[in-house]
Image (cartoon, rainbow, N blue to C red):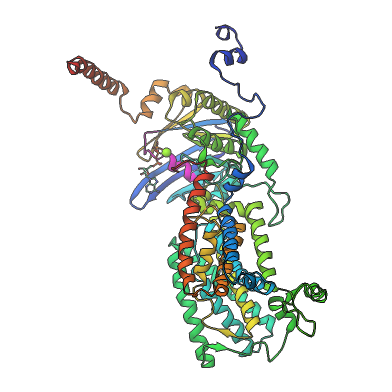
Amino acid sequence: MSALVPAMELSGVSVNFGSVKALQDIDIKVYPGEVHCLLGDNGAGKSTLIKVLSGVHRPSRGQILVDGRPVAFRNPREAQAMGVATVFQDLGMIPLMSITRNFFLGREPTRSSLPFSRMDKERANSVAKQAMADIGIDVRDPTQAVGTLSGGERQSVAIARAVHFGAKVLILDEPTSALGVHQAAMVLKFIIEARMRGLAVIFISHNIHHAYPVGDTFTLLNRGRNRGTYAKSDISRDEVVSIMSGGEDLKVVEAEIEALLASIAAQRPAAAL
Amino acid sequence: MTAVEQQVPDLTSQENRFGIKPKRAGGADERLAAANWFTKLLRRPEAGAAGGLVATIVIFALLPGAANLYSLQGAMTFLTLSAELGIIATATALLIIAGEFDLSIGSMIGFAGVVIGLTVRELGFPLWGGIASAFAVAVLVGYLNGLIVVRTRLPSFIVTLASLFILRGLSIAITRAVTGRTQIPYILDDVPDPATAGLFNGHVFTGFFRWMAAQGWIAARSDGIPFVTGIPASIVWWLAITAAAGYVLTQTRYGNWIFATGGDQEVARNVGVPVGRVKISLFICTACAATLLATIQVMEAGSADTTRGLLKEFEAIIAAVIGGVLLTGGYGTVYGVLFGSLIFGLVQMGIFYTGIDTDWFKVFLGLVILAAVLVNTYIRTKALGGGRSR
Ligand SMILES: Nc1ncnc2c1ncn2[C@@H]1O[C@H](COP(=O)(O)OP(=O)(O)OP(=O)(O)O)[C@@H](O)[C@H]1O
Ligand SMILES: [Mg+2]
């Protein structure tokens, strides 16, 4: 794998928002045919990192490389044009617009290449409906406003869209957080399929049952810094869990919860008197 | 529990046990309540404006002066008023749907007239050259408005309020400095160019109207020329612009971008919509619409006046809101604006013909705005399926 050129690479990237140092000196390489999991506590900088890769934020320092060549994305559209498809944590949906219009937003299929050529709505509707069916959501009506969908359905639209358009790099920022059992399993299947097709996948999840089985490589972010990248063979499931919780020993927290529950149970009979 | 024992779960028996319909079972979707055509019609964003138009037509039909208002001549008068408003209201609506306002269009109307007047009268431009100069200035003004809004992220309300004063001030100051007055008369007189002027002040279907007069169907003077010689060019421009804008908004990718930009500009940008370009191009559209209206008015009057277009920006916004465009952006139609402009023209002329003191027009206008905004909010929640919260 090391002989390969990374599909995408960040080299010495820092991102500042005013005085907030969201990312500091990040180096990360994402290879084709690899699922790269980003791990880290809330606020570690995961979303900021993938927004740099998606062209939303421009790095304050450092470089982005695509296929080994430096690039400077001026906006997300340019990142998309290089084959980067992203499911953002806030999903990137316009509530008042229909499923289909959201699905194809920014990449509308037109009947010809003339400036004001008509959108191919029939094709768009059927593609959107099919893509949603593939993920396990049976869409009632693709012209329904996204604002009326359930949280999981909305997440599924965003994932179906990224999977449909992802050409080189597929980025998923906590895509499974609102999904049902079946839909989450479908998303994991999609991730594996995308990897087999040779895409580089970047996957952010706080759920060990989702991240560990599909991940090939794990990068640990903590307080805006890269604390190391590990192949799956070099890191155990328990270590991943402890990284995900920001180094906090879960056993301690669990013991605290146990104690709390026990004290509540002890008070119950007293309260009943 | 046969389903558990089998390797491949048998969906039909699961359905029996839990009452679950397998995914992709096909058939009509039982979760969709069949909406009848009337409900569907009511859910359209222009429904409120269409209803309002019908109500307005009926009310004025019952009031005195209806015969005059609904005569051919009366109708042409209010349709012309509607057309002149509709031209700028349509462009304004597109901009509001994209989440921005342009308060400078009223001043742009005056400024464009001044540009035509001064280039033709003082610089000796041919008429078409003067009109082309006005449109070039409009493109520049719209571009600057848009660029400042996009770059600074200031509210367009403030940015274009500044342009409102700058353009009006420039119109008056330049005209007074050059001519010593605030009006520029005789624009069409020195080098007459009826072909160019006719594009803006002419009439279409004149043959048809003469023929109808010959048949005795419409009123005509003693020499056989009908009082209404044809449909004014302004109405043709209005309908053409409405049709074009309606097509662009609902059928093209650019229209999709307009909705998305107004819906949530950060999201739109993140999924690859060129938000800045969309906004700047729409500011250019509003400035050009104002210039088209100015050209029509200058061609009809033969003169330019620095005070033309006063408060027109608010009339345009009102027509758009009556037409069902959401003031917060992201939602609306162009056909609703057509109805909104019709209501506006009809009421303005209707109040004149009924003999009601025209001062009441403003009171009425205020009430209509309030009603329109309430109806819009109601329809928006309907569009989102009747939910109270967003
Ligand atoms: N636009 C911004 N302006 C200022 N600070 C920001 C901005 N975006 C992110 N930050 C800060 O940068 C840090 C990293 O945020 P980020 O969203 O990348 O975290 P995360 O790892 O994705 O967390 P989570 O797991 O909660 O999604 C946070 O402390 C956040 O407050
Ligand atoms: Mg995040």
User: Within the image, what quadrant is residue B112 found in?
Assistant: bottom right
Q: Is residue B292 above or below residue B371?
A: below
* Residue A156 visible: yes
Picture residue at 58% right of the left edge, 66% below the top: B60
Query: Which quadrant of the render holds ligand 2?
Result: top left
Residue A29 to residue B24: above or below: below
Q: Position of residue A226 (x, y in %)?
A: 40, 37
Q: Position of residue B224 (x, y in %)?
A: 80, 82
Q: Residue A239 in the image: x percent, y percent? A: 38, 23
| In front of the other: B324 or A24 | B324
Q: Residue at x 73, y 85 (%)?
A: B193
Residue range corresponding to the magenta coloring: A40-52
Residue A190: percent from the left, percent from the top? 58, 29
| Quarter of the picture holding the C terminus of chain B | top left
Foreground residue among B200 and A22: B200
Q: Is residue B337 visible?
A: no
Q: Quadrant of residue B26?
A: top right
Q: Residue at x 35, y 29 (%)?
A: A245
Please state if B45 lies on the left or on the right of A219 as rendered.
Answer: right
